Image: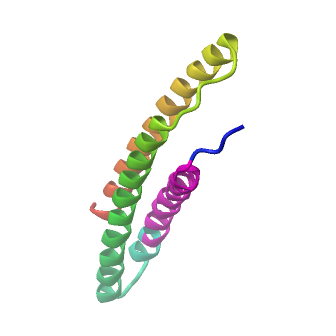
């Protein structure tokens, strides 16, 4: 089996896609947790400072989502077709379902992070 010359770029892109998907989720969770702490602080100055941190983490959410989309687009360019027609049909169907579910999760999670960071 021949190895493509740009195989290491493809693998790095795939790693970045997965890494930034996890980073996106982590940032959404951090936004939520920091918001809970900020809401419970008796000192308004400390709460305001944490709100500024929330804004930064919201932008991490946005940037990581952009990286996921770009690397996903690049990933589609290097897509390797399945070996059989039966496998191709199943894989295509599952990829559509996966991207629909994750697309809704990314939209909902990003909206949630925005609504928590900028109430």
Specify the principal SS of the magenta part.
helix
Give the total of numbered labels.
Answer: 0
Q: Residue at x 54, y 49 (%)?
A: 10
Instruction: Specify the segment rendered in magenta.
Output: 5-34
Given residues 119 and 8, the one toward you in this image is 8
Q: Is residue 112 visible?
A: no
Residue 101: horizontal and vertical position, in percent? 51, 32
Residue 38 location (% of width, % of height): 40, 76
Against 87, is 107 above or below? Answer: below
Q: Is residue 8 left or right of residue 76?
A: right
Q: Position of residue 70 (x, y in %)?
A: 38, 48
In the rendered structure, the answer to whether residue 28 lies left or right of residue 58 reads right
Which residue is nearer to you in this view: 76 or 96? 76
**Could you tell me which residue is drawn at 51 percent across and 24 percent down?**
96
Q: Quadrant of residue 46?
A: bottom left
- Assess whether residue 9 is covered by the magenta stretch: yes
Residue 54 is left or right of residue 84, and the answer is left
Q: Is residue 101 visible?
A: yes
């Amino acid at each position: 089996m021949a190895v493509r010359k740009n195989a290491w770029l493809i693998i790095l892109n795939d790693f970045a896609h997965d890494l930034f998907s996890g980073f996106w989720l982590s940032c959404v969770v951090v936004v939520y947790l920091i918001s809970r702490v900020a809401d419970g602080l008796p000192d308004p100055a400390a709460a305001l400072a944490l709100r500024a941190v929330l804004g930064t983490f919201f932008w991490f959410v946005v940037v990581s989502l952009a990286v996921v989309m770009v690397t996903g687009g690049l990933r589609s360019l290097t897509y390797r077709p399945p070996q059989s027609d039966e496998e191709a049909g199943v894989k295509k169907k599952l990829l559509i379902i996966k991207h629909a579910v994750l697309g809704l999760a990314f939209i909902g999670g990003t909206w949630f992070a925005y609504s928590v960071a900028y109430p």
